[in-house]
Amino acid sequence: MNTRTKPCATMAVLAISGALVAAGFAQSTPGSKPAADAAGTQAGHRADQPETPQQVMAKRAGEYTREIQFLNSSGPQGEPFAGTSKISVILDGHFLMEENDDVVFGKPVHGIRIYGFNNATGNYELASLYTMSNAILLFTGTSSDGGKTVDYSGESATAKGEKLTLRAHFRQLNDDQFVVTVANMGADGKESPFQSTTYKRKK
């Protein structure tokens, strides 16, 4: 079997990697880290106050390389694919926008993701779009460590209309690197990871 063969349902949800983030406001140059007062910090915030989830997410702004690895039950499947990502703080610091450009199975793939934290519900939220689908994938997530890791859950569908429950796990490794792993949720409640995307900040 060709190890580069497209895994089931993978391309239908490629935009999530993550894998799971412009204009104008606090946009970082390649390799730079946003200053604390320009990364979505709200007016009147003091240094002795805890950071809001929006401020924590804003630190992710910048330009990255992406390494996309497909997975199966025995581990990595084939060689990883390469791409790039630009993450910007938008709308007065309320959201992050991620713009991706990848080449997967020989085809260019472009995607946009919007990340946010809903103060009313206490949930992280993610909207994901990309060029190989006309669906907008919506996810909600929770974190127990202030946003260093976020567990997202959402639903998608196959071309035949079969419903898929998806999980996306975000994990911040350090200031310059994070990983998003995407999994299908089986009827037995067990996750089957099928894609992992590693982001590294450009220097």
Image: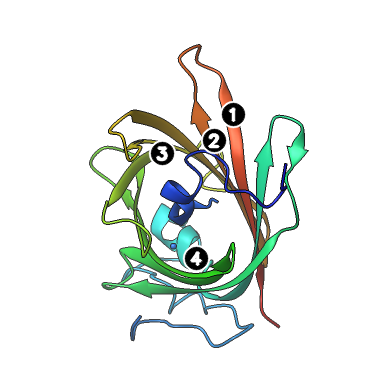
Q: Are marks 4 and 3 in contact (CB under 8 Å)?
A: no
Q: Quadrant of the N terminus?
A: top right
Disc 2 marks a residue whose amino acid type is: Ala
Q: Is residue 20 above or below residue 28?
A: above
Q: Find numbered disc 4 in the image and state the secondary structure of the residue it sits on.
A: loop
Q: CA distance from mark 4 to mark 1?
A: 42 Å
The crowding category of the residue bearing disc 1, from other C-alpha atoms within 10 Å (few below 14, some 14 to 19, many at least 20), is some
The residue carrying mark 3 is 141
Marked residue nearer the N-terminal end (2 or 3):
3
Q: Nearer the viewer, mark 4 or mark 1?
A: 1
Q: Are marks 2 and 3 in contact (CB under 8 Å)?
A: no
Marked residue nearer the N-terminal end (4 or 3):
4
Q: CA distance from mark 4 to mark 3?
A: 27 Å
Disc 4 marks a residue whose amino acid type is: Ala
Q: CA distance from mark 1 to mark 3?
A: 18 Å
Disc 1 marks a residue whose amino acid type is: Ser
The residue carrying mark 2 is 183
Q: Can residue 20 be seen at all in this image of the molecule?
A: no
Disc 3 marks a residue whose amino acid type is: Gly
Q: Residue at x 50, y 31 (%)?
A: 184
The image quarter containing residue 128 is bottom left
Disc assigned to residue 47 = 4
Q: Residue at x 38, y 60 (%)?
A: 132
